[in-house]
Image (cartoon, rainbow, N blue to C red):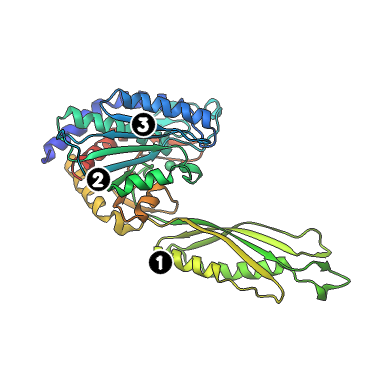
């Protein structure tokens, strides 16, 4: 499998499979799988597991108490030995849509686009991985490494129950390929992702009558406002740093000096050292008004996926795509994924290898059907040449 011609036959083979790719996608999308509905999610895990069990692979379901089961599929290397090295293909089957969404947002195909809840983020990615493996086998190529496919159930709600499993598989792997959707209809791979966090600032002041004893009060809302004005200045959009006060509350009535106020912040940073700097500054916040107290909770929960972690894999993807006769591009994503978790461990990670389409998390979510074989072929080529 060294020559461009062989890679091209891989793509041709997958192109001939397009109707089956779409049929499998339909089965996955018609089984709704919201992160927060365990019964539904488990049923979807079973539908996906059933497809993989048809192949000669080892399928395991990791049952969760409150979430759908995580799926681990292991495919032995082709030399008959237990390979010591491993490649990880990562994704999630949960969606942001509650059950019943399918009735308003049905699975449908129109003008080459496939619509439905979770079609783009990211059930098409799982289908492409399945067919990539089939194509590798049909072309008779030998896998040099063990491949582990991990399909988790809680990416959309922060990966609490899957994080350990993701990290332990990533640590065993030479590279991680994340089948999250590509960016936009051009299908850009995600070679960098911002780190994401959430912090809460709680201010304690002192209540008093706003008219009779204003001098006795410490206004928690005023204190919080002063702090937020300061935090606003930490924003540095060209550098990829953003701090957004997304929720604020405090006070009871206009004539009462409020003794409590709080804000919840969304935090983003493109560089690890910026992330650390922001966390340090948050923890170091000092009250501005005399008598006020400040507490800060939270911080970053996903470190950035820095471009240097994906650079080499992206170069490889570029060259493989070129040999197959198509072009790919790259982009930086403002949002996090489980790729951030594996990149934070220093494991080479390439994200956005999944479906090409647009409209994630919206009623217009779609993928471009004709891009599925290309994407599957690119993954197959990466698995053979990494
Ligand atoms: Zn996703």
Q: CA distance from mark 1 to mark 2?
A: 33 Å
Work out whether residue 17 or residue 40 is closer to the camera in this orientation and state it. Answer: 40
**Which image quarter is the C terminus in?**
top left
Mark 2 or 3, closer to the camera:
3
- The residue that label 3 is drawn on is 60
Q: Earlier in the sequence, mark 1 or mark 3?
A: 3
**Image coordinates for residue 231, horizontal then vertical, percent:** 57, 68
Q: Badge 3: how crowded within 10 Å, few (<14), some, or many (20+)?
A: some
Quote the CA–CA distance across marks 1 and 3: 38 Å
Which picture quadrant has residue 324?
A: top left
Q: Which residue is mark 1?
A: 273
Tell me: residue 196, above or below residue 138: below
259 left or right, relative to 44: right
Q: Residue at x 52, y 69 (%)?
A: 234
Quadrant holding the N terminus: top left
**Label 3 SS:** strand
- The crowd level at tag 1 (other Cα within 10 Å; few <14, some 14-19, many 20+) is few
Q: Which residue is mark 2?
A: 327
Whether residue 25 appears in this view of the structure is no
Does residue 360 appear to the left or right of 226 in the view shown? Answer: left
Q: Are marks 1 and 3 in contact (CB under 8 Å)?
A: no
The quarter holding residue 358 reads top left
How many neighbours does mark 2 have within 10 angstroms: few (below 14), some (14-19), or many (20 or more)?
A: some
The foreground one among 166 and 276 is 166
Residue 269 position, x and y percent, is 44, 61
Q: Quadrant of ligand 1?
A: top left
């Amino acid at each position: 499998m060294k020559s461009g011609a062989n890679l091209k036959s891989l793509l041709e083979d997958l192109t001939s499979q397009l109707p089956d790719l779409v049929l499998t996608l339909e089965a996955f999308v018609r089984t709704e799988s919201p992160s927060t509905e365990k019964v539904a999610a488990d049923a979807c895990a079973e539908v996906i597991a059933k497809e993989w069990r048809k192949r000669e692979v080892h399928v395991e379901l990791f049952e969760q108490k409150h979430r759908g089961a995580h799926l681990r599929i292991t495919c032995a290397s082709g030399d008959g030995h237990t390979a010591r090295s491993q490649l990880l293909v990562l994704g999630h089957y949960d969606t942001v849509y509650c059950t019943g969404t399918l009735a308003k947002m049905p699975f449908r195909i129109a003008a080459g686009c496939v619509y439905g809840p979770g079609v783009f983020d990211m059930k098409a990615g799982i289908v492409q991985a399945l067919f990539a493996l089939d194509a590798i086998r049909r072309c008779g190529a030998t896998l040099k490494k063990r491949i582990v496919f991990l399909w988790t159930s809680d990416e959309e709600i922060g990966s609490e129950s899957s994080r350990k499993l993701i990290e332990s598989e990533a640590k065993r792997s030479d590279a991680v390929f994340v089948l999250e959707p590509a960016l936009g209809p051009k299908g850009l791979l995600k070679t960098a992702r911002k780190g994401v966090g959430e912090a809460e600032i709680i201010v304690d002041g002192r209540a008093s009558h706003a008219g009779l004893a204003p001098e006795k009060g410490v206004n928690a809302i005023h204190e919080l406002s002063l702090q937020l004005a300061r935090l606003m200045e930490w924003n540095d959009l060209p550098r990829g740093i953003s701090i957004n006060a997304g929720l604020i509350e405090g006070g009871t009535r206009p004539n009462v000096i409020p003794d409590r106020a709080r804000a919840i912040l969304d935090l983003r940073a493109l560089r690890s050292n910026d992330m650390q700097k922001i966390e340090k500054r948050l923890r170091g916040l000092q009250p501005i008004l005399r008598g006020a107290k400040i507490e800060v909770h939270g911080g970053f929960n996903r470190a950035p996926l820095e471009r240097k972690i994906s650079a080499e894999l992206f170069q490889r993807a570029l060259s493989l795509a070129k040999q197959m006769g198509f072009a790919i591009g790259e982009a930086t994503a403002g949002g996090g994924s489980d790729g951030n978790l594996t990149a934070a461990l220093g494991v080479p990670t390439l994200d956005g290898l999944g479906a090409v389409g647009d409209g994630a998390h919206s009623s217009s979510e779609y993928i471009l059907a004709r891009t599925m074989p290309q994407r599957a072929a690119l993954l197959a080529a990466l698995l053979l040449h990494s």
